[in-house]
Image: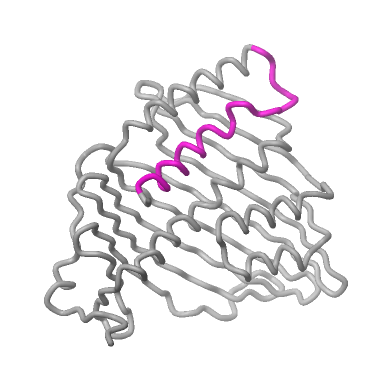
């Protein structure tokens, strides 16, 4: 399931632009974009192992309270199809801001590690106890779900491409650079579409409640950029920037989210293994 899911989202990141309805692109540009992304999609289908890093920056400014929250997430994912293995490391940093944007509170940095092996199953680190836990097979669906959720930024492109004003393609430093942009989207069905996306990705109810709590929402700006290797047509990097405006009776929020994803070590047989400390020191979770 997971090997299909991850590759599906990578291909989705490439393919959502293929039939984009942007209105500021000439016919020659359109043909070029479709040709490059078509070759990229075929090239990525041959990828069976990779190292992926995801850096996410998010800031929410509460205008009525003159405060804000800033968060940074770093995720490193090792994926190998044969033998099948996924290992993920997550670092999370959270700050509370004052009216001037200065940090008034900084939460302790959190680190998480998890590993899924088709033979040994799912294991996750308990940071406080500094030990590893082995989980039952049915619990192993959680890491699969978490990988799907962390990729939902890519699925958002499938929605946003309908509103695109501009799609451009340039060549620089051995890469094709494809950019999708738009400024200010205020559509009546936008919240409904985003809510549907959240439901389809099995995201948390908190995400859904947040969307439905802000009926007056507009996208001030979004930009998606793909960096494709000009020689191999391999997707090496993708960046999604999104600025949202949310309005309620007693609260106005400006939200900024930037997600940068990079793929490397493609088809190099990472040979990722379950951490050695898991075997002798871990204990099974949910034992009778």
- Tell me, yes or no, if residue 91 can be seen here: yes
In the picture as drawn, the residue positioned furthest to the top comes out as: 28
Give the percent coordinates (x, y) of residue 135.
29, 73
> Farthest residue in the front direction?
288
Residue name at image x 46 percent, y 36 percent: 11
Q: In which quarter of the image is the C terminus?
A: bottom left
Q: Is residue 36 above or below residue 60?
A: above
Q: Position of residue 100 (x, y in %)?
A: 69, 71
Q: Is residue 80 left or right of residue 72?
A: left
Q: In this image, 37 relative to 213: left or right? A: left
Q: Residue furthest bottom?
A: 288
Q: Bounds of the magenta span?
A: 3-27
Q: Where is residue 23 in the image (x, y as percent from the top left)?
A: 75, 25
Residue 16 in the magenta stretch? The answer is yes
Res 112 → quadrant:
bottom left
In the rendered view, tell whether residue 92 sits above or below residue 287. Answer: above
Residue at 72% across / 55% down in the picture? 244
Which residue occupies 27% across, 77% down? Answer: 133
Q: Is residue 173 visible?
A: no
Q: Position of residue 200 (x, y in %)?
A: 59, 54
Is 171 in the magenta? no
């Amino acid at each position: 399931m997971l090997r299909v899911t991850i590759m599906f989202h990578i291909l989705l990141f490439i393919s959502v632009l293929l039939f984009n309805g942007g209105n500021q692109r000439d016919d020659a540009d359109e043909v070029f974009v479709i040709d490059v992304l078509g070759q990229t999609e075929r090239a990525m289908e041959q990828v069976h192992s990779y190292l992926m890093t995801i850096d996410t920056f998010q800031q929410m400014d509460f205008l009525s309270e003159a405060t804000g929250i800033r968060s940074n997430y770093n995720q490193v994912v090792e994926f190998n199809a044969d033998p099948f293995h996924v290992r993920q490391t997550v670092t999370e940093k959270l700050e509370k801001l004052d009216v001037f944007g200065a940090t008034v509170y900084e939460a302790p940095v959190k680190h998480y590690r998890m590993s899924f092996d088709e033979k040994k199953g799912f294991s996750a680190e308990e940071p406080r106890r500094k030990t590893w836990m082995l989980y039952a097979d049915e619990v192993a669906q959680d890491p699969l779900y978490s990988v799907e959720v962390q990729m939902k930024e890519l699925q958002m492109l499938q929605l946003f491409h309908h509103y695109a004003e501009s799609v451009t393609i340039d060549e620089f430093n051995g890469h094709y650079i494809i950019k999708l942009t738009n400024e200010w989207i205020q559509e009546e069905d936008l919240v409904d579409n985003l809510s549907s996306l959240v439901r389809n990705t099995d995201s948390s109810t908190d995400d859904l409640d947040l969307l439905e709590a802000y009926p007056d929402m507009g996208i001030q700006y979004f930009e998606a950029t793909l960096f494709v290797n000009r020689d191999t047509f391999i997707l090496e990097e993708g960046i999604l920037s999104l600025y949202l405006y949310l309005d309620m009776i007693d609260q106005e929020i400006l939200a900024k989210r930037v997600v940068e994803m990079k793929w490397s070590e493609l088809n190099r047989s990472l040979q990722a293994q379950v951490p050695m400390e898991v075997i002798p020191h871990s204990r099974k979770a949910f034992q009778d």
